Amino acid sequence: MASERYNAKTVENKWQQRWNDAKLFEAQTQPAEGRETYYVLEMFPYPSGRIHMGHVRNYAMGDVIARYKRAKGYEVLHPMGWDAFGMPAENAAMKNKTHPKGWTYDNIATMRTQLKSMGLSLDWSREFATCDVDYYAKQQKLFLDFLDAGLAYRKNATVNWDPVDMTVLANEQVIDGKGWRSGAEVEQRELTQWFFKISEFSEDLLESLDTLKDWPAKVKLMQANWIGKSVGARVRFPFVKGEGTTATEIEVFTTRPDTLYGAGFMAIAAEHPIAQELAKDNQRLITFIKECRKLGTTAAAIDKAEKLGFDTGLTVAHPFIEGRELPVYVANFILMGYGTGAVFGCAAHDQRDLDFARKYDLDVISVIADSKTPEVAMPVEDIAYVGDGVLTSSEFLNGLTKDSAIATAIEKLNGQILDGKPQGAGETNYKLRDWGVSRQRYWGCPIPVVHCNDCGVIPEKEENLPIELPDDVTFDVPGNPLDRHPTWRDVDCPSCGKPAKRETDTMDTFVDSSWYFARFADPTAETPTNVEAASRWLPVDQYIGGIEHAILHLLYSRFFARAMQATGHLEVKEPFKGLFTQGMVVHETYRTKTGTWITPAEIDFSGEGENRKAILAETGEELIIGNIEKMSKSKYNIVDPDDIIATYGADTARWFVLSDSPPDRDVIWSEAGVDGAHRFVQRLWRLVDTVSEKKTTNGDDAANTALLKIAHKALSNVDVMIPGLRYNSAVAQIYTLVNAIDQAAKSDKTSSDTLRHTLSITLQMIAPMMPHLAEECWHVLGHVTMISASPWPETDKSLLEESTITLPVQINGKKRGDLEVAADLDKSGVEEEVLKLDFVQAALSGKTPKKVVVVPGRIVNVVI
RNA sequence: GCGGACAUGGUGGAAUUGGUAUACACAACAGACUUAAAAUCUGUCGAGCCUAGCUCAUCCGGGUUCAAGUCCCGGUGUCCGCACCA
C-alpha cells in the first residue's frame, strides 16, 4: 500500500541517487556500432550565485528531449558546464574583498547542488568550467592556431571604452552609447587590440543560414541583417574646387550607381578625414561636427532629429556629365562606419536625400520613368520614388531596367581611367565588422603572446601553455591587476630570450562560450577537441536558450566552428543543427500607492478581470497591480526555485513551467498555477495507488478497447509533440488520458490489466517531464526496471483505425448534425447517406442541393 | 522611420495547416462529504434569445471560397530587433 500523500522530497532524493549509481545518463565515449547519437544542449549558465526560474525552464525543456530521445533508443549526450569568466566575479571581488576564483567556484558549487535537485538527466562526468586551467589552456592553443592561420590579428582601433568597468566593449555591447553592463557613457579611445577575422566568413555565414532548417526564421533574419550584405559600386569623384584639403577626390560606396544622372550633391560624415581636415581652420565646421556627435546613435532617435548639413563650398566633378559640379556637404545622417563614409545624394530616389535636398534647396533630378512611358520621368515632390521602372534622362542608361543599368554604369566607370586607375568598380559590402576580443580584465583567458622590444609580438611557445592566471592579485584600484603584477608580466622573449612583457589583455568571455559545445564531446582530450569524438556528436541536434543570444553568441559560435575547421580542430562548420529560443519566466508586479514594490507572498487577491484586486494582507491597503515582467530582484517579483522545490518538489516545478505556455512564449508564474500542477501530481499518485490495489478483473471488451484507443491516440500525439517541443500540447494529451483512466478506474467495466497497461503508458509519457514521480509510480505498479532506462512504448496503429467514423454535416457551411458511416465508404456513398438524414431532408424541403462537398474522413457540406 | 512577430472566454492557451472554434488547464460559482475547514468528488462556466432549438462571436473593415481563427487587401493595438546601411 502506497502512503497517503506523495512525498516529493524523499522520492526525488531516492531516484536521483539511483540514477546516479546506475550511471544512467553518462554518454558512452564509444557509442555502440550503428546506434544513432543525439546531442541536446542548453546554453550553459553563468555562475552568478543561484539558479533562477529561467534556468529551471531552460533545463527542464532540454531534459524532456534528452530523456525522450534516450527512451527512443538514441545514445544521448546531455552535458552541463559553466560559463565562468567575466566581470561580475571581479565586481564582487572589488565589493566584497573576495577573490574572483573563490567567488566563482563557490557559486558553481551552490548552483550545481541546485541543478542536481531538479533531477536533470545530465552527464555530470563531462562537467567543466571555462575558468578551469585545463579549458582555457586549450583555448590558448586555439588562439595560437588562429593567429598562425591569419584569423587572429592586431590592429589599432578606436574602441568603445567603458570608464566604469575600465574595459573595452564590442560594438555589440554598446547600447545607446552606454556600456551594456555598467550603463556608463562610453568613450572613444585609440588602442591596439586583438581581433578575430569574422569578416573572412561574411558571405559563408550569410549563405549558410539557408541550410539551418531547424532554426527559427526570426533568428536567421536577425543574423542576416547583422551581416548586412549590400551589392553596389565604389565610385571616385575628383575635386573641382578642393581648397583646404589635401585629398584629390571623394570615394563613395553606392548600391544605386544606376541613378548617377540624378546626383545632386555629395555628403560626407562628420568623422570623414576630409571633414576633419577642413575643420582645422573653420570654427563653424568644428561647431557643426560637435553638434553631429551630440545626436543619439539609435535609428529611432536620429530619425526624429532634423537632417542637417554644412556646405563646405567645395565641389566635385560628375563622372558622366562634362562640366557638371556637385556641392560637397558634411551631413549628420552619414555614418563613417559603413562604406566609405561618403555618399552621392540622389534626391529623387532616396527619401533621406530628398529631405536634405529640400532643406538646402539642392537639385532634385528624377531619372526613373514608368516603362510604358519611358521618356517621362516620375514626378517627385515630397516623396522619393524608390519603385521599379526604366532609366530616363540618363544618356547611355536610358530605357534600361535597374539591374542592367547598374551593370552598365559599373562597366562604364570601370573603363574611365582617372589618375591611372578606373573611376569605379563593382563592390560588395558587409556591415559585419571583425570581432575585437581584447579585454583589459583579470578574470578571463590570458592571450598567449609576448611583446618583445626587438622581435615585436611573439606567440608563446606551445610547450609553455597554459599561461596561467596568477592567484595573487588585488582589486583595490580600478584597471587590470595583470598590468601591475611584475613577476607574471615580466618574462623572457620566447624568440630571442631577452627581457620582454607578457600580453596582459585577456579574451572576451564570448570566446569561452564559442566552442564549449565541441569540448563536451571529449572534455579530457589533450588537444582542444578530440576531432573524432566531436565529429560523432556534432552538430548539436537541439540547442536551447534565450532569444537574447540570437546574434552575438550564435554568430560567434558559427564563426568559431569555421575557424576551427580551418585549423583542423573540427569537421563541421555549423555547430547547431536545431535551435530553439525559449520564452522567459515572468510574474506580475505589485506596488503600494507610494511606489514600494511588494512581494506576491504578502498579498491577498480577490475578484477577476477588471475587478481583480490585490490587498496587502498586513494593512489592508489596496495595491497597484503592475505589468507582468521578467523576474528581477529590483521588482520583488522573484520566485526562488529552491523554495518551490522544497515546498512542492522538482517535478511540480518542472510540470508547471512546461505545461502552462508554449515553450517559445513567456510563461506567467502564478501560485495558483503551481498549486494546480501539484494537485495533478497528487491525483496521479492516488490513481496509481487505486489501480495497483485493484483485484484482478476482466472487464468487458468494449470498455477495454475504448480505453486502449484513447491511450494509443494520446501516445501517437505525444510522440509528435515532444520532438516538436510542443510540451504544453503534450501535457493536454496526458491530462485527457489520465481523466479517461480515472473514470474507467471507478467502475469494474475495464479490466485491471488494461488499467495497469494504459497507466504504464501514461507514466512513460510523463517520465521525461516528471521523472521522479513517474519512476516511483512505475515501481508501485510493479515494474522492476527503471522507467528512465525503459524504451518508449510503441503506438499500436491498429487501435487508431476506426471501422465507423462520425462526420460533421454542414448545411451551407454551418454545422447542423452528424453522420455515422463506415470509414471506408466512398464519396458517393457518403453523399447518398447524407441526403437521407432528417435534418437535411427538412432543410432541402424537396429541392435538390446545388452541391454536396464530401471531404473524406473530415466533413460533409450540403449547399442548397 | 525601417524590418519582423503576434492579437481566440475572467486567465494561460488548443484547433490535425482551409474542414465540428474554444481541446486541456487555471480561476470562479453551485452541490456532496465534514461539527467546521482543508483535501477530495459531482456539476455549471463565450454572449444573447422566442431555449427539443436559433442567432451572434477568434482585434476592426472588406474580399476569395461550398467552407476562413487559418489565405488576400486595408486599418488598429501590443511586443521584439535596428548600425539613417547609401
Image (spheres, coloured by chain):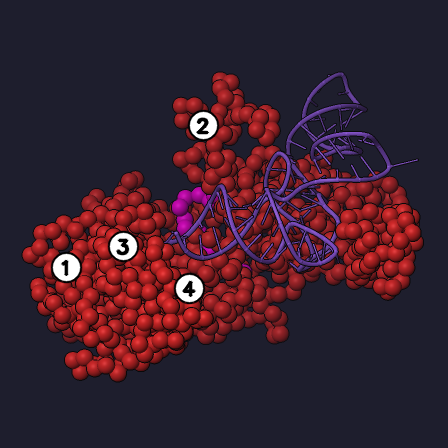
Chain colours: A red, B purple
Identify the residue at image location x=54%, y=66%: A213
Q: Specify the subunit that label 4 lies on.
A: A
Identify the residue at image location x=27%, y=63%: A345
| Span colored in magenta | A40-52
Query: In which image quadrant can residue A263 be found?
Result: bottom left
Compare marks 3 and 4 and give the one earlier in the sequence: 3
Q: Which residue position holds label 2?
A: A591
Compare marks 1 and 3 and give the one earlier in the sequence: 1
Between marks 1 and 3 in the image, the one whose residue lies nearer the viewer: 3
At label 1, counting other C-alpha atoms closer than 10 Å, the crowd grade (few under 14, some 14-19, many 20 or more) is some
- Name which residue type carries label 2: Arg
At label 4, counting other C-alpha atoms closer than 10 Å, the crowd grade (few under 14, some 14-19, many 20 or more) is few
> Which mark is drawn over residue A358?
3
Between marks 2 and 1 in the image, the one whose residue lies nearer the viewer: 1
Where's residue A559, x and y in %? 39, 67
Q: What kind of element bears circle 4?
A: loop
